[in-house]
Image: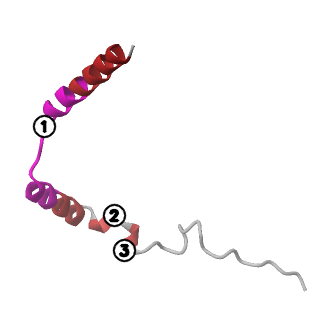
Amino acid sequence: MSSSSNVVAMRKVVQQLRLEAGLHRVKVSQAATDLKQFCLQNAQNDPLLTGVSSSTNPFRPQKVCSFL
């Protein structure tokens, strides 16, 4: 029973290794360059960099309504 479960486990390992070997790899330097370029191209749309106008900010403090 132990040898058959060992064979099944090894087949799963081989299948996973074949899957990983078939993946397209990109060099880290190229990925970093692409990421930097993407960030620079989309910086004008990033609310963390440009801020959010108070009229469209859903998290702005609510105005208190009081009747005197």
Kindly indicate whether the residue at mark 2 contacts the one at mark 1 (C-beta within 8 angstroms): no
In front of the other: 59 or 34: 34
Residue type at mark 3 is Thr
In depth, the one of 55 and 35 nearer the eye is 35
Identify the image quadrant of residue 16: top left
* Res 41 label: none
Q: Which residue is disc 2 drawn over? A: 45
- Secondary structure beneath dot 3 equals helix
Is 67 within the magenta? Answer: no
Residue in the picture at 29% in, 67% down? 44
Label 2 CA crowd tier, 10 Å (few <14, some 14–19, many 20+): few
Q: Which numbered disc, 1 or 2, marks the residue that appears first in the sequence?
A: 1
Write the start and end of the magenta stretch as one range. 15-34
Instruction: Give the residue at the far right of this rendering.
Output: 68
Q: Report the disc number at residue 24.
A: 1
The residue sitting at 26% across, 27% down in the picture is 13
Q: Main secondary structure of the magenta part?
A: helix
- Mark 3 or mark 2, which is nearer the start of the sequence? 2
Instruction: From the image, tell me which residue sits under label 3.
Output: 50
**Residue 15 drawn at (x, y percent):** 23, 23
Q: CA distance from mark 1 to mark 2?
A: 30 Å
Q: Residue furthest front?
A: 2
Residue positioned 39% across, 13% down in the render: 1
Residue 66 lies, with reference to residue 22, above or below; the image says below
CA distance separating discs 2 and 3: 7 Å
**Three-letter amino acid code of the residue under disc 1:** His
| Spot occupied by residue 20 in the image (x, y as percentages of width and height) | 19, 33
Which type of secondary structure does the marked residue at label 2 adopt? helix
Q: Is residue 65 above or below residue 45?
A: below
Label 3 neighbour load within 10 Å: few <14, some 14-19, many 20+: few
Contact between labelled residues 3 and 2, with CB atoms less than 8 Å apart: yes
Q: Residue at x 9, y 59 (%)?
A: 29
